[in-house]
Amino acid sequence: MTNLDAAGSFRLGSHNVKRMGYGAMQLAGPGVFGPPKDREAAIAVLREAVAAGVDHIDTSDFYGPHVTNQIIREALHPYGDDLVIVTKIGAVRGEDASWNPAMQPAELASAVHDNLRNLGLDALDVVNLRIMGDVHGPSEGSIEAPLTALAELQQQGLVRHIGLSNATSKQIAEGRGICEIVCVQNLYNLAHRDDDALIEELATQGTAFVPFFPLGGFTPLQSSTLSGVAERLGATPMQVALAWLLQRSPNILLIPGTSSLGHLRENLAATELKLSEDVVAELDGIGAADRQ
């Protein structure tokens, strides 16, 4: 059995969680829309992840929509006391599978209640406010109105902790003036490192940083350097990419997603892969061109 404790733990809301978690996005159909082709396989992946020690799962009711939350409930409810389910709100899906902003107070309240109903919960552990700027990158603008609305839902007891997704440093600072921010979920991986400084900033504040698309997302990471390192280490490129993130900063929590048991096992095994300083320096060069 893979030892997830090898990567340590970090604070997420009111829990210390193991740094390797699971992202449920890929449990929906193609394009994160509609049902999966094999619902039983999706259930099996979730159950094996938790059995292996995963204690935080990332999801959203706009995955599907509703699909991943309903599968999580079928697979894992009633939930163990140590399982943290993190969801996000701030968008809805169009009938054409489009991703559309939904940041008005009534829309945010509806999203919280949808998540509660589909997950079978009385209160949500952590809710990330997804800021709909660019599709996968942040853009500046005040978040006071939607975050205040979410904080009011927290005060009602429907939400325990609040995080931000697709956020800038300025927005995070603004958010801290409204409520406690327990995590930030932004695009970040070996090749996309715009948030290097932000990760350091959050680490000094004891705030978790959760990279979405840690393996590249819809376009998986491809690099001859990454492939070469993986071959030398007897690992897969994706395992190396995950191990690099785990060593990047102790406040990084990972949520790689998959609908395959084989890929799940490979991802979890990345917690036991240790990279030397020379290897880390070699891998750092992959994203260097983008930072010049």
Image (spheres, rainbow, N blue to C red):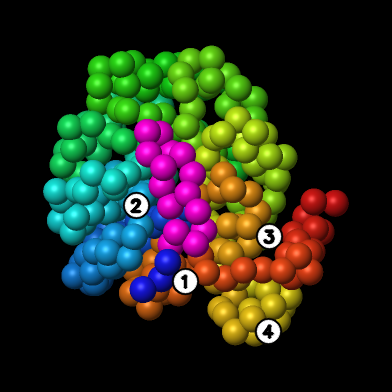
Residue at 47% x, 22% y is 180
Name the residue tied to disc 4: 232
Q: Is residue 30 magenta?
A: no
- What range is drawn magenta here? 4-18
Secondary element type, mark 2: loop
> Is residue 3 rendered to the left or right of residue 7?
left
Which comes sooner in the sequence, label 4 or label 2? Answer: 2
Identify residue for label 3: 191
Amino acid type, mark 3: Ala
Front: mark 3 or 1? 1
Is residue 135 visible in this depiction of the protein? Answer: no
Q: Which residue is at 69% across, 78% downward? A: 229
Task: Give the image location of residue 177, x and y in percent.
Answer: 54, 15
Q: Which mark is residue 237?
A: none
**Circle nearer the N terminus (1, 2):** 2
Report if residue 11 lies within the magenta region. Answer: yes
Q: CA distance from mark 4 to mark 1?
A: 17 Å
User: Separation of disc 3 and disc 1 at Cα?
Assistant: 21 Å
Residue carrying label 1: 269
Provide the residue designation for mark 2: 55
Closer to the camera in the image, 244 or 92 = 244
Where's residue 24, x and y in %? 35, 56
Name the residue type under label 4.
Arg
Q: In terms of depth relative to the viewer, which is nearer, 57 or 5?
A: 5
